[in-house]
Image: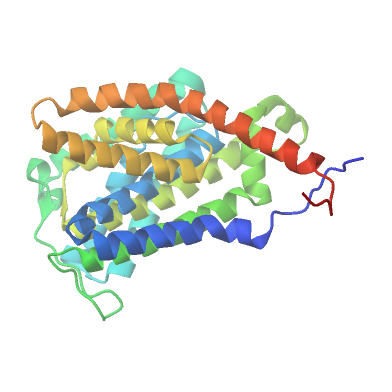
């Protein structure tokens, strides 16, 4: 008779995905040096998509205004570097705080609503932030963007180079740590409570969970990582434009999340890599009609992903049944 095991997975199974990610980073660094700037941008963007996954995949809050949190973090890091301190780690901290503050203030209002109303209000927040950035030209540069700031050496050791080596290492390390932290948080009682709210709000409320307070904490947490992502992108590019607050960025991030699979931070990472790679390849292949290429490939990939996922799941279940049915100690 088989028993249900509630023990955590073996340590090697928990560490293996991180090892594979590190191996891929080393492969890109040594064998694709000309793609390091692109890889750095993908790593920074992946943090943003994973922060969106916290809200959409784990909390069940559909949003199209997440770029406001990203853009505020980017502008905060840029303004800090221009007027106060060019320390990159301090810039990440300020970006995280800016994203958290905007998430907290807007979340107090947004989380009074659900569904389509919540979705439309998130877009409104993003448009308001973009409009303010456009009007405050003295601080943000308006339509020309915020530029002219420099970033100090990372930990006083390495400065950004034209080849993108330092930028890639910096972005990858921050992305790696952010991924680990988000996975730990979502595996905690707080994260499990948020997943429970996503699955059944009424039951969680009946169990005494403060729904709005839990979702507000989750929204602030996503703002922290979105702000870090924006600050990271601003430091690497050393320019911040109005598009960091735009609706297009939120929509693209949602596409990346759907492509990789919501409710799974690894899926958000994979979706970001796939979308950004297709974006880069398609725009190089056809600079005038690259959106058509991306749209067609995304449709095919989303349709095939479901079929391939079912086929792979069936194969794995069949393999598990074979392994379980084989008696221990038998020889061929």
> In the figure, 213 relative to 290: above or below?
below
Q: Residue at x 12, y 65 (%)?
A: 162
54 left or right, relative to 69: right
> In the figure, 85 relative to 202: above or below?
below
Image spot of residue 52 (x, y percent) = 43, 40
Image spot of residue 259 (x, y percent) = 40, 32
Q: Nearer the viewer, residue 312 or 302?
A: 312
Identify the image's colour scheme: rainbow, by chain, secondary structure or one colour: rainbow
Q: Residue furthest right?
A: 1
Q: Is residue 132 visible?
A: no
Res 86 → quadrant? bottom left
Image spot of residue 204 (x, y percent) = 71, 32
Q: Residue furthest front?
A: 332
Q: Nearer the viewer, residue 182 or 35?
A: 35
Q: Residue at x 22, y 52 (%)?
A: 38
Q: Is residue 306 visible?
A: yes
Res 215 → quadrant? top right
Q: Nearer the viewer, residue 214 or 22?
A: 22
Image mark count: 0
Q: Residue at x 61, y 33 (%)?
A: 315
Image spot of residue 176 (x, y percent) = 43, 59
Q: Residue furthest bottom?
A: 157
> In the figure, 24 relative to 216: above or below?
below
> In the figure, 200 relative to 48: above or below?
above
Which quarter of the rendered picture does the N terminus lie within? Answer: top right
258 left or right, relative to 44: right
């Amino acid at each position: 008779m088989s028993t249900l095991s509630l023990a955590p997975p073996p340590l090697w199974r928990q560490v293996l995905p991180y090892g594979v990610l590190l191996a891929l980073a080393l492969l890109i660094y040594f064998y694709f040096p000309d793609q390091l700037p692109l890889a750095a941008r993908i790593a920074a963007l992946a943090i943003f998509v994973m922060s969106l996954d916290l809200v959409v995949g784990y909390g069940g809050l559909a949003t199209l205004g997440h770029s406001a949190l990203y853009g505020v973090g980017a502008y905060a890091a840029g303004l800090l570097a221009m007027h106060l301190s060019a320390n990159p780690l301090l810039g990440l901290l300020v970006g995280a705080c800016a994203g958290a503050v905007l998430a907290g203030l807007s979340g107090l209002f947004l989380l009074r609503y659900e569904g389509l109303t919540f979705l439309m209000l998130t877009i409104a927040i993003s448009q308001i932030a973009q409009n303010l950035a456009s009007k405050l030209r003295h601080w943000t540069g308006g339509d020309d963007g915020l530029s002219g700031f420099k970033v100090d050496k990372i930990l006083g050791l390495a400065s950004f180079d034209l080849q993108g080596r330092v930028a890639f290492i910096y972005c990858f390390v921050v992305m790696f740590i952010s991924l680990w932290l988000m996975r730990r948080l979502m595996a905690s009682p707080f994260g499990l409570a948020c997943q429970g709210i996503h699955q059944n709000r009424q039951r969680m409320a009946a169990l005494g969970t403060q729904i709005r307070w839990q979702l507000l904490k989750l929204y602030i947490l996503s703002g922290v990582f979105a702000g870090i992502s924006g600050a990271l992108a601003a430091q690497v590019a050393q320019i911040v434009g109005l598009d960091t607050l735009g609706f297009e960025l939120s929509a693209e991030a949602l596409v990346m999340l759907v492509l990789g699979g919501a409710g799974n931070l690894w899926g958000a990472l994979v979706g970001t890599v796939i979308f950004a790679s297709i974006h880069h390849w398609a725009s190089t292949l056809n600079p005038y009609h690259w959106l058509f290429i991306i749209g067609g490939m995304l449709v095919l990939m989303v349709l095939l992903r479901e079929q391939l996922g079912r086929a792979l799941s069936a194969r794995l279940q069949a393999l598990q049944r074979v392994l379980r049915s084989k008696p221990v100690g038998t020889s061929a």
